[in-house]
Structure formats: C-alpha cells, structure tokens
Image: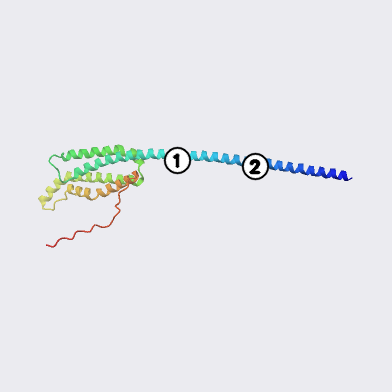
Amino acid sequence: MTEIWQHLGITAIIAALIGWCFREGIKHWLDKDVADYKSRLESEKQIEMEKLRASLIQQATEHEIRFRSLHEKQAEIIAETYKRLKRFYDNVLSYTDLFEGASEPSRSEKLKTVNEAYQEFWQYYPLHAIYFPKITRKRVTELVNTLTSITRRMNQGLATYDKKAQIAARVGKDMPEDPWDKAYEKMQKLVPPLLEAMEADFHRILGVKEDIPQDNSEVPTEKPQET
C-alpha cells in the first residue's frame, strides 16, 4: 500500500508538473502572440500614419502651388488692369486740365486718346473681373464711371457753352458756369479718393504693406524769431 501511495503521489506530482508546464507554455505562447499582434498593430499604425502624413504634405504642397499660381495670375491681372485704368485716368486728367501748354495736343486729339483708353480698358477688364473681390470690383467700376461722367458732362457742356455765354452777354445775365472749370474741380476733388481706395485694395490683394514709422511723435514746430 505504501508503494502504491508513493507511486500515486509521484504520478500526481508529475501530472501537476506537466499541467503547470503546459499552462505556462500556453501562457507564454499567448503572451508572445499578443505581443506580436500588438507589435504588428503598432507597425501598421506607424505605416498608416506615415502614409497619412505624406498625403497631407502632398495636399499642402499642391494647395500651395495652386495658391501661388493663382496669386501670380492675380498679380498679372492687377498690373494689367491698373496700367489700362491709369492710362484712362491720365488722359482724362490731361483733357480736363485748365493749364495747356503750346506743345500739347488739341482738345479734340486729347478726347480721342481718352476714348481709346476707355475702349482699351473695357476690352480687358470684364473678362478678368472675376479675379477681384466684390468690393474691389465696385471701386474699380465707381472710379471708371466717375471719370466717364466727368468727361461726358464736360463734352456736353462745351457743346452749348459758347451759345449760352453769348445769350447771357446779350441779355445782361450772369455768365453760365464754365463746364471746363467744373470738370477740373471734380477731377481734383472726387477722383483722388476713389483712386486711392482702389490702389489700397490692390495693395491688400497683393500683400503689399505700407511702412509705418515706429516713432509717431509729432515734430515740434520751430518758434518764429522775433523781429
């Protein structure tokens, strides 16, 4: 009996040892499998993150290229628009100027160049106005309409001014207002603010920043010397 019990005890110990080894083997295998799975997930995660990062970089680069290309195109259109509009403005300014030099073209020749500059502007601008913000388009149109109105009213006034002046002189009434003087006055008062506002819009679109002095203190005026 003693031997039997001893044999059973040894068998139980061996069985328990085998069972423990089996459990430890399975546990080790499971732990290793879980570790491998986690490692594989982490590796796949890193790969996907790199793909996503590369995709975002590519999209950002493409967006930057498109934006730069659009900005360059916009800058070209602004330059061309401003050149044509400035030519129209300069010709109207010359046409309405009260001080004419002897070597300057005649009034009819100046009016011809005004009309040519006007046509040149409108042949270009409507096809490219889409590149400008709404407020800028409004300012461009307001400036052009003002210049056009000043020119048209001056022409209409000059066509009848001499006749009105003769009638006023004959009947002893006050002389009518000179349309040339009126056009010149409007060019000096109405147009500069419109031109300045439009140029400020162009600067804003192009990213041009005005230089602001660091020291805004007023310069003291020199005290006049006593006589």
Q: Is residue 22 above or below residue 219?
A: above
Q: Position of residue 181 (x, y in %)?
A: 17, 49
Amino acid tagged 2? Val
Tell which of 66 and 212 is nearer to you: 212
Instruction: Say which mark, if any, is on residue 34.
Output: 2
Q: Which residue is rendered at x = 22% and y = 42% of the image? A: 90
- Dividing the picture into quadrants, the one containing residue 119 is top left
Question: SS at mark 1?
Answer: helix
Q: Within 10 Å of the Cα at label 1, are there few (<14), some (14-19), or many (20+) other Cα atoms?
A: few
Residue that lies at the very extreme toward the bottom in this rendered image: 226
Q: Is residue 71 left or right of residue 175?
A: right
Can residue 155 be seen by looking at this rendering? no
Q: Position of residue 102 (x, y in %)?
A: 12, 41
Using the numbered discs, state the Cα–Cα distance from disc 1 to disc 2 in whole angstroms: 38 Å
Q: Which residue is rendered at x = 61% and y = 42% of the image? A: 38
Amino acid tagged 1? Ala
- Dividing the picture into quadrants, the one containing residue 45 is top right
Q: Position of residue 195 (x, y in %)?
A: 27, 47
Tell which of 38 and 32 is nearer to you: 32
Tell which of 53 and 6 is nearer to you: 6
Tell which of 34 and 97 is nearer to you: 34
Q: How many marks?
A: 2
Classify the position of the C terminus by image quarter: bottom left
Q: Is residue 22 left or right of residue 142?
A: right
Q: Within 10 Å of the Cα at label 2, are there few (<14), some (14-19), or many (20+) other Cα atoms?
A: few
Q: Is residue 128 left or right of residue 58?
A: left
N-term mark: 1 or 2:
2
Q: Which residue is rendered at x = 74% and y = 42% of the image? A: 21
Q: Is residue 226 above or below residue 44?
A: below
**Mark 1 = which residue?**
60
Question: SS at mark 2?
Answer: helix
Q: Position of residue 54 (x, y in %)?
A: 49, 38
